[in-house]
Image (tube, rainbow, N blue to C red):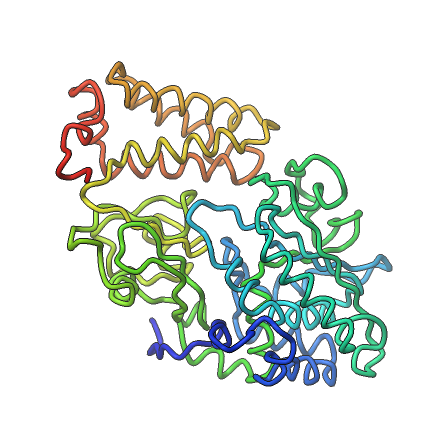
Amino acid sequence: MVIPMPLAPVLSSRWLAPRSWSLSTYEQLDGYQALRKALRASPDDIVALVGDAKLRGRGGGGYDAGMKWRFLKDDGKPHYLVVNADEGEPGTCRDAPLMMADPHSLIEGIIIAAYAVRANTAFIYVRGELVHARRRIDNAVREAYAAGYLGANILDSGYELNVIVHSGAGAYICGEESALLDSLEGYRGQPRLRPPYPAIAGLYGCPTVINNVGTLACVPYIVLRGSDWWKQVGATNAPGTSIYSLSGRVERPGQYEAPMGITLRELLAMAGGIKDGRRLKFWTPGGSSTPMLTADHLDLPLDFDSVRAAGSQAGTGATMIFDESDCVVRAVRRWAEFYAHESCGKCTPCREGTYWYVQIYDRLERGDATMGDIDTLLAISDSMLGKSFCGLGDGAASPVISSIQHFRDEYVAHYENHGCPFSRQPALAA
């Protein structure tokens, strides 16, 4: 069930304000009022409030944020909050605009979350290529320190928090939370064996909460206006709004804030429809690592559980649109090349599987593939899916499996035509 969806902006409500990234603008628009309210409550009350709001992580997994916070146990060790701002999923571009336009919403969310989990140090791990976003975050942190929102005795509450901003080195694998922790500690970014999980032994072996930028940016609104207000919009199992990155063959690509559970048909209407009046062919609901869907799924609610039930994942909300002129084999080949390049090489299924994906897709494009290559792609996928050390193997296999499931005839056409049939259709390829 999807609750009626007004389109009044929440997370993006300040984006068009003059100098929206500045502290003065943020304070004029209710900024840091939620922090004042949170500091008057107990940490357990804040955890309970976020849990009651059913806030689910916007980083891809859709985990219950309140439950994630409750996992941290007081064992005498320091607690840490780590912000995953290593936005690297192909097609995803929502954390960067948020950090650019409204960095203080993230800072305020960090302070409230850190207070709730009893952490006195927080780290923001920013993707190294997001240079301008890093500058905005750095400036916001400096402003917050100067205004007394960070540091010792925040707002005379007795609570202390220090925030450290760290730039990654451009590795996609560091978006995986345990690889991010290794990178943050100065090691090569590779996923850790689990258990133990970060809530037990995370950063420096201490209890750690890792949240995405979009998740933490939601927190001030929930604290300030309450969980009942938050649950008025969106899907009943995933309330609130989210930012969807709409790209590809649409008239107006960009970031669209909408309640969780909006359908692709509604998103496309907001973006002016498919470019040049063409027909939708396939699309990704949450980035290239999520199984692709087709025009048959236009009315699928884009919340975590509905998309999972349809055989895909809501992921990061990276909705990439492809029309009838696009070759599905060529699109998946590009993604396969990306995953082969970004595989950390720690486990054999992913390291070898992504390598052989690229070889087979090259053959399909060149025109010297065999019919057996299609079954080989599926066999490689079977050796990767659920058998790799982390989710990168699953993410690499998902578009391969789903594209063959929905468009096997197009793969066969590459074999029968000795290459991509779309390259012989200039009218469609234009």
The mark total stands at 0
Looking at the rendered image, the quarter that the N terminus falls into is: bottom left
Q: Quadrant of residue 426?
A: top left
Q: Quadrant of the C terminus?
A: top left
Q: Nearer the viewer, residue 86 or 76?
A: 86
- Residue furthest to the front in view is 18
Q: Residue at x 65, y 62 (%)?
A: 137
Q: Vertical placement of 264 versus 249: above or below?
A: below
- Which of the two residues, 341 or 300, is positioned nearer the viewer here? 341
Residue 67: percent from the left, percent from the top? 61, 64
Query: Residue 239, how many percent across, how many down?
Result: 45, 72
Q: Is residue 53 left or right of residue 291?
A: right
> Toward the viewer: 140 or 393?
140
Q: Relative to residue 344, is residue 375 depicted above or below?
A: above
Residue at point 32%, 52% (across, down): 310
- Residue 231, position as x, y percentages in the image: 46, 78
Seen at 63% across and 56% down, the residue is 134
User: Residue 280's spot in the image, x, y percent?
Assistant: 21, 50
Q: Quadrant of residue 299?
A: bottom left
Q: Is residue 114 above or below residue 225?
A: above
